[in-house]
Amino acid sequence: MDKTILLIILGMGLVTYIPRMLPLVVFNSIKLPPFLQGVLKNVPFAILGALIIPGIFTINGDIWFGIIGASVAFIIAYLGTNVIVVVLSAIIALSVYSIFF
């Protein structure tokens, strides 16, 4: 492998690792206020909503895919489960829908 390509890969790894590591190191000893902790716990669900909503309105074909997937995702997210569980439950619901319809 060329040394230039290896240096590029190492550089890209550093550039991605540093922004992920710095908040962990900086906020490790700082106790955040409860309000800010609550806000930060809801960020993944807000991002999930921002990713799902445009897909519902721009779906080509069966509009029920968007409606069912969003409904299942929003109900499971409202129950307070993990984001991975929300995504997997929507995928499972749409898989079942595609099998029967």
Image (cartoon, rainbow, N blue to C red):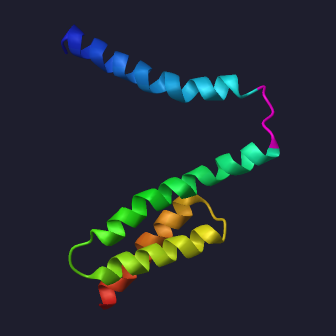
User: Which quadrant is home to the C terminus?
Assistant: bottom left
The residue located at (77%, 47%) in the rendering is 35
User: Which quadrant is home to the N terminus?
Assistant: top left
The residue located at (45%, 72%) in the rendering is 90
The outermost residue toward the bottom is: 100
Q: Position of residue 88 (x, y in %)?
A: 47, 66
Which range is magenta? 29-33
The quarter of the picture where residue 11 lies is top left
Query: From what the image shows, is residue 9 above or below residue 24?
Result: above
The residue located at (64%, 29%) in the rendering is 24
The residue located at (36%, 84%) in the rendering is 97
Q: Position of residue 75 (x, y in %)?
A: 57, 75
Q: Position of residue 49 (x, y in %)?
A: 48, 61
Q: Nearer the viewer, residue 25 or 10?
A: 25
Query: From what the image shows, is residue 21 above or below residue 7?
Result: below
The outermost residue toward the top is: 3
Query: From what the image shows, is residue 21 above or below residue 34?
Result: above
Q: Is residue 87 magenta?
A: no
Query: From what the image shows, is residue 9 above or below residue 60?
Result: above
Q: Nearer the viewer, residue 47 or 22?
A: 47
Q: Is residue 31 magenta?
A: yes
Number of labelled discs? 0
Q: Main secondary structure of the magenta part?
A: loop
Q: Position of residue 76 (x, y in %)?
A: 58, 72
